[in-house]
Amino acid sequence: MGKQISIFVENKPGKISKITEVLGKAKINLKAMTIADSGSFGVIKIMTDNNQKAYDVLKENNFLVSLQEVVVVEIPDKVGSFHKVAKILEKNRVNIEDAYGFITTEGVKAVLILKVKDVKTVEKILKEKGYKIIDF
């Protein structure tokens, strides 16, 4: 099972650099990030090499943060890989609430991060289909 940190921030210059500064000073390595703009505010979602420590450090530095369980699944880095996962989940009546991904080895491996209602059930479904679940 993976964990992701969501950070609610004002959409202003310097907010991202403050987050990366706090993480850097705590010797936390940023592994994945996505930013969603919603006008005056945004949501930054991150995964690090130590999500609990990152959450704690950001909270101590007065950031509005939450820590959520997510499914982190390894998929091939090729056309149709995400579609196969999406079809499996559709057949099992699972709604993907949010998703993003990144390539770990170009042309070989990618990682897909899924926010779903029931993380453990989705992990079980994907494992049964031969997918590797990553603790992150």
Image (cartoon, grey):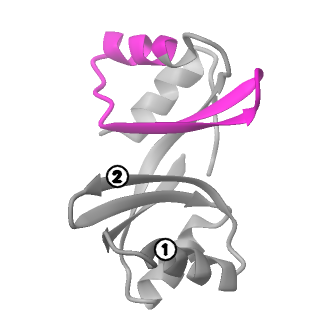
Q: Give the mark nearest the N terminus, 1 or 2.
A: 2
Under mark 2, the amino acid is Ala
Residue 56 appearing in the image = no
- Which percent across, then down, holds residue 32? 59, 52
Q: Is residue 11 above or below residue 129?
A: below
Q: Secondary structure at mark 2?
A: strand
Determine which residue is flagged by label 1: 55
Check residue 93 for magenta coloring: yes
Residue 87 appearing in the image = yes
- Which percent across, then down, holds residue 120? 44, 38
Looking at the image, which residue is at 49% across and 74% down?
Answer: 55
From the viewer's perspective, is 40 left or right of 104?
Answer: left
Q: Neighbour class for label 2 at 10 Å: few (<14), some, many (≥20)? A: few
From the viewer's perspective, is 23 left or right of 93?
Answer: right
- Which percent across, then down, holds residue 9? 32, 72
Camera-near label (1 vs 2) is 2
Looking at the image, which residue is at 38% across and 81% down?
Answer: 63
- Which percent across, then down, holds residue 99? 42, 37
Determine which residue is flagged by label 2: 36
In terms of depth relative to the viewer, which is nearer, 126 or 66? 66
Say which mark, if any, is on residue 39: none
Residue extent of the magenta highlight = 83-112
